[in-house]
Amino acid sequence: MLRHIWEKSALTVFPRTMIFALTLAFTLPAIAQVNCGDQPKDVPPDVQQKLSGDIQGKAQLFTKLLGDAGLTGKVDASRNEVYQKYHNIDKSQIDRYMIWVSCQTINADHSLSAVTR
């Protein structure tokens, strides 16, 4: 009788475990997907348009430098370049837009693994 109960419970546990394992295997890439959030609403469209080309180019460079020790220095230097070029735009707006564009660019780079993104 005890053997019968064990066999029955083993048969019900295995499918549950397998379903869990398969679910985990198919959802891990989705879990690794980063949500960058909505486009910053407090950065006016005209400001975004002015910044767009410069920041997108810098964001692509950041993607290439992921994992590199010099990434932080390059981000700081790039941010300072944008501050100087657009000295009439609020720095916090530049920062928010740069973060959002960089996140979008990194997320869209399919050459990076899900873990790296």
Image (tube, rainbow, N blue to C red):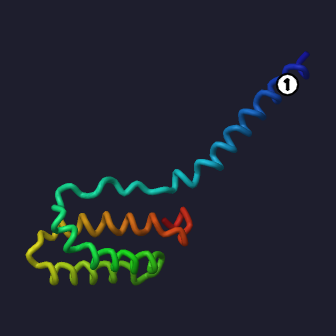
Numbered label tally: 1
Viewer-proximal residue among 110 and 18: 110
**Residue that carries the numbered disc 1 in the rendered image:** 6
Image quarter where the N terminus lies is top right
**At which x and y percent is residue 78?**
28, 81
Name the residue at the left extreme.
Answer: 88
**At which x and y percent is residue 75?**
32, 78
Q: Splitting the image into 4 quarters, where does residue 72 fall? A: bottom left
Q: Splitting the image into 4 quarters, where does residue 7 fall? A: top right
The answer to whether 104 appears left or right of 26 in the picture is: left
Q: Residue at x 33, y 82 (%)?
A: 73
Residue 11's place in the image compared with 113, above or below, is above
Name the residue at the top extreme.
Answer: 1
Residue 52's place in the image compared with 7, above or below, is below
The answer to whether 7 appears left or right of 12 in the picture is: right
The answer to whether 27 appears left or right of 56 in the picture is: right
> How many neighbours does mark 1 have within 10 angstroms: few (below 14), some (14-19), or many (20 or more)?
few
Q: Residue at x 63, y 49 (%)?
A: 26
Q: Residue at x 28, y 57 (%)?
A: 39
Residue 39's place in the image compared with 66, above or below, is above
SS at badge 1: helix
